[in-house]
Image: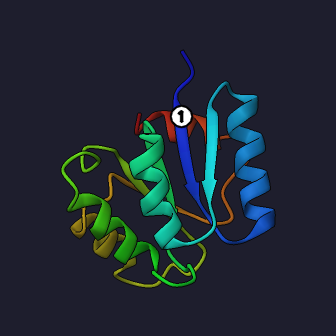
């Protein structure tokens, strides 16, 4: 059975690349384009993992992750922060709110799927 990954990403190019790489490596992919939609999809889809962009419309990735981690039915799902706006302290902030991992963009297409498997 394929592992399901929810990608919460508002950038079409990043979403396309991540989806392509994950599907090529045998994952099922569902997507959301905003933080709020990401929380809703986490509830309805019950993915095995969530890739959470930090810069999102309506609710940023930190807020969406905090919300997910506050809901009993889905708080166990590993969330990996994915961001191109990596500033000093961002990695620590992501782990402090419950993220299982942190990946900086642009990610390496050669190692992306292997990196993701660490968190499932």
Does the image show residue 19?
Answer: yes
Report the residue marked by disc 1: 4
User: Foreground residue, 29 or 108?
Assistant: 29
Left or right position of 21 against 76: right
78 left or right, relative to 102: left
> Which picture quadrant has residue 46?
top left
* 120 is higher (above) or lower (below) than 1: below
For the C terminus, the image quarter is top left
Number of numbered discs overlaid on the protein picture: 1
Residue 104: image x %, image y %?
56, 65
The answer to whether residue 53 of the structure is visible from this angle is no
- The structure residue drawn at horizontal position 76% and vertical position 30%, both measured from the top left corner, is 24
Q: Residues within 10 Å of mark 1 (few under 14, many from 20)?
A: many
State the residue in front, 42 or 3: 42
Extreme-top residue of the structure:
1
- Tell me what residue is drawn at x 57 percent, y 72 percent: 34
Q: Nearer the viewer, residue 91 or 6?
A: 6
Residue at image point 33% right, 69% down: 94
Q: Quadrant of residue 110?
A: top right
Q: Quadrant of the N terminus?
A: top right
Q: Is residue 85 above or below residue 102?
A: below
Q: Residue 105: give x, y in percent of width and height.
A: 63, 66
Q: Position of residue 64 (x, y in %)?
A: 39, 70
């Amino acid at each position: 059975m394929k592992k399901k990954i929810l990608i919460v990403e508002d950038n079409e190019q990043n979403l396309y690349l991540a989806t392509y790489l994950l599907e090529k490596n045998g994952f099922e992919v569902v997507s959301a384009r905003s933080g709020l939609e990401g929380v809703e999809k986490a509830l309805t889809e019950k993915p095995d993992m969530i890739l959470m962009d930090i810069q999102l419309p309506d609710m940023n990735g930190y807020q969406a992750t905090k919300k997910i981690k506050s809901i009993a039915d889905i708080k166990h799902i590993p969330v990996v922060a994915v961001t191109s706006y990596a500033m000093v302290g961002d990695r620590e902030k992501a782990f402090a709110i419950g993220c299982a991992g942190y990946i900086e963009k642009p990610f390496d297409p050669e190692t992306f799927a292997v990196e993701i498997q660490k968190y499932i």
